[in-house]
Image (tube, rainbow, N blue to C red):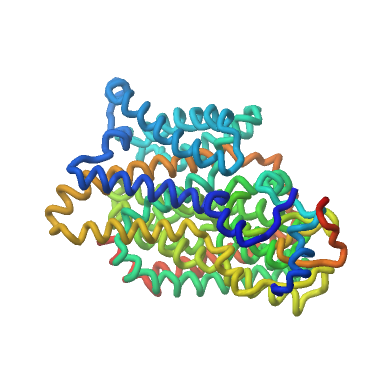
Amino acid sequence: MSSTISNSSQWGELFKKEDWWSIWIGLGLLLSAILFFSAGSSIGWVAVIPSKWHTLSDLWDQLVKNAPRYLGQFILWITILGFAIQFLKISFKEFFGSFLFIYLISILVFALGQWDKASYYNLEPPLVALALGLVIANLIHLPKWLESGFRVEFYIKIGIVLLGATLPFTLIIWAGPIAILQASIVSLTTFFVIYFVGKHLGLDRRLAAVLGAGGAVCGVSGSIAIAGAVGAKKEHAPISISIVIFWAIVMIFALPLISKALGLPTGVAGAWIGTSEFADAAGFAAAQTYGAYAGQVPGIEGNPEAAVNAFTLMKIIGRDLWIGIWALVLSVVATTRWEETGITGRANYGEIWRRFPKFVLGFLVASLAVTAISRGYDFAAYKSNVVPHLVDPIKNLRSWAFIFCFFSIGLTTRLSDFAKAGVKPFYAFTAGVVVNVILGYILSTQVFVDFWVKLGQQ
Amino acid sequence: MTANPGVKTRQCANCRFFKNTPADLERSMGGLRVLGSGHSSVVSDDGMCEKLDRYLSGRYVCNLHETEA
């Protein structure tokens, strides 16, 4: 089945793409939080998270005590997500069971991360959720209907919009240009390394470009966007997707561990992860894991939020935003300079908007809104009133969205589903990984180090 | 793309060989759902051409076009 392109379909995108739904959901939650806050109340009751615990009986007591709040929160999530997925043509009946499964496991994963010895045993929720999901997906045969709720991208986009509410807009303005500069240096270098190594190994130019975009811009999304723009062979995107996922999962574990061994400040590690991770969801898992080390692992400086903030600036503002431009340029190059495929026509400037990751708009609006509200308070009032009654509940809901996402990454990573990538594409991509990781490390820890350290202290 | 309405009707998006529902894409690309999605904005109006065995923009045009019945 295909869809006709018309002006009405452009408007229809507002309800057919998960990017827009992540905006409606994220900003809807934020608006509700602001309304409650303005009325002298808070959405804190429903934004419950497990608190720190020492013994299992501590944990049991708090879970029993807060059971009505968790039930309320489940009803909130299933209502708003269930409404949205109807428009994405996903069965609500299947989604309900699947999301219930995700939510119950997420409570356990979140609670485990709140154990006072969790950091000692490296039981950070992102890593536990991912590892648990991987084990379940690859060792247990799950019924097909259960997969309806494993929507990695949907959850991460909602989380990113909510993240905007906790990231001051002034910080985006201050740090955005450096993030764009650093990300651009790494993106361009990585793309050309993968492209030319791939070409040297005899790969089709379109496959080399698809791999290059996967490594340089935004992983799986970069691969499929460029595959469509250049008219790649049907196997090109799946090959790139397989390699991207392999390296993205390796980096989820490797980058925080290496950063921890080197004792990098949270802001610096976040910037490095932002330049050298290959996918948003994977990068958030790595950055959130590292942020949790602050204050828990001796020698790691900076505030816990800085890792996620620096990652967000680098990955979302520095890399993801530009996917439409990459698609436009490569489409023009493919149709004018590469071998013919029987296809005519090429992209125009509208391509930049059509492929623009719209959820970023929600992220920016959320940041602007909370920054504007905060301006009416002095620092003491902000800390004692705005943070606990407005910012923290949003941060808690964001944490839930991220855990749903991390668990879903593991649950969808079934090794048997992946395309056989072949040795040459793997070598080409890996050459880019090596250059990317080294260059990202040098830029984050040497060239722009003062900047990222300062961000971690704010 | 050209604004010529004749060309617009011959765009791949209107061809019977072109498959681009999110479910089609997620089925045909193993691993797409792991760190991506068929519902994403970056997918734009891309889809799979079963005639050319290519993944391409629905705004492209080709000589093998056959309008959807």
What residue is at 50 percent from the left and 54 percent from the top?
Answer: A280
**Does residue A146 appear in the picture of this structure?**
yes
Q: Which of the 4 quarters of the picture holds residue B13?
A: bottom right
Image coordinates for residue A97, horizontal then vertical, percent: 54, 27
Is A431 rendered above or below residue A99? below
Image coordinates for residue A406, horizontal then vertical, percent: 49, 42
What residue is at 73 percent from the left and 73 percent from the top?
Answer: B4
What residue is at 77 percent from the left and 69 percent from the top?
Answer: B7
Left or right position of A58 against A411: left
Image coordinates for residue A51, horizontal then vertical, percent: 28, 33
Which quadrant, please, contains the N terminus of chain B? bottom right
**Does residue A307 appear in the picture of this structure?**
no
In front: A282, or A144?
A144
Check the image and name the residue furthest to the bottom.
A337
Image coordinates for residue A246, horizontal then vertical, percent: 62, 50
In front: A244, or A175?
A175
Left or right position of A342 against A288: right
Left or right position of A255 against A411: left
